[in-house]
Image (cartoon, helix red, strand yellow):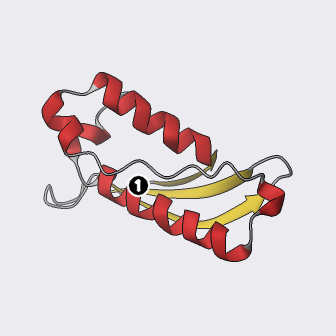
Amino acid sequence: MGDLATPIYTCQIQLCQDVGDHVDYCVSVLHRSGLRWQKWRRFSDFVHLHDELIRDCSGEEVARLPVSPRWSWLPSFTQTTESLDQQLQELQAYVTAVVVQPELVRHVA
């Protein structure tokens, strides 16, 4: 098993794909044990995760939450490569900030 100073998880979001009515993002997760997996998630899944964390966490934990990813109300077919790249970078920053906090990683949301 990994060193306890090593974060429990690391996540990377490197790919996104327009699937017609929305964009999916590929989240690659690495557990400190070496186990890896990938999940495709919609942008709204990250927004819902943030809402659940706010609802269920203590005030102290909520204060440490990163800012929620900004949700674009533009239809996916109107988004440019640059806007999708920007969203991907914002999601990466958000996920990175969440997974380095053990109390949030252990949360059921």
Residue sitting nearer the eye, 109 or 37: 109
The x, y position of residue 21, in whole percent, is: 83, 46
Residue displayed at 47% across by 63% down = 90
Q: 10 Å neighbourhood of mark 1: few (<14), some, or many (≥20)?
A: many
In percent of the image, x 28 and y 51: which residue is there? 8
SS category of the residue bearing label 1: helix
Quadrant placement of the N terminus = bottom left
Residue 109 showing in the rendered view: no
- In the displayed structure, 34 sits above or below 54; it is below
From this viewpoint, is residue 40 visible? yes
The kind of residue tagged 1 is Val
Coordinates of residue 43 in the picture (x, y in percent) = 60, 48
Q: Residue furthest top?
A: 56
- At 19% from the left and 36% from the top, the residue drawn is 61
Residue, far bottom: 82
Q: Nearer the viewer, residue 34 or 94?
A: 94
Location of mark 1 (residue): 95
Give left or right: position of 6 versus 32. left
- The relative height of residue 18 versus residue 105 in the rendered view (above or below) is below
**Front residue of this view, candidates 91 and 99:** 91
Is 13 on the left-hand or right-hand side of 24? left
Give residue 26's quadrant in the image: bottom right
Q: How far from the left and from the top, in percent, is residue 25?
A: 63, 56
Q: What's the residue at 37%, 27% (across, down)? A: 108
Q: Is residue 77 left or right of residue 2?
A: right
**Count of numbered badges drawn on the protein:** 1
Please state, as top left, top right, bottom left or bottom right, where the C terminus lies in the image.
top left
Whether residue 76 sits left or right of residue 43 in the image: it is right
Residue 85: x %, y % from top left: 61, 72
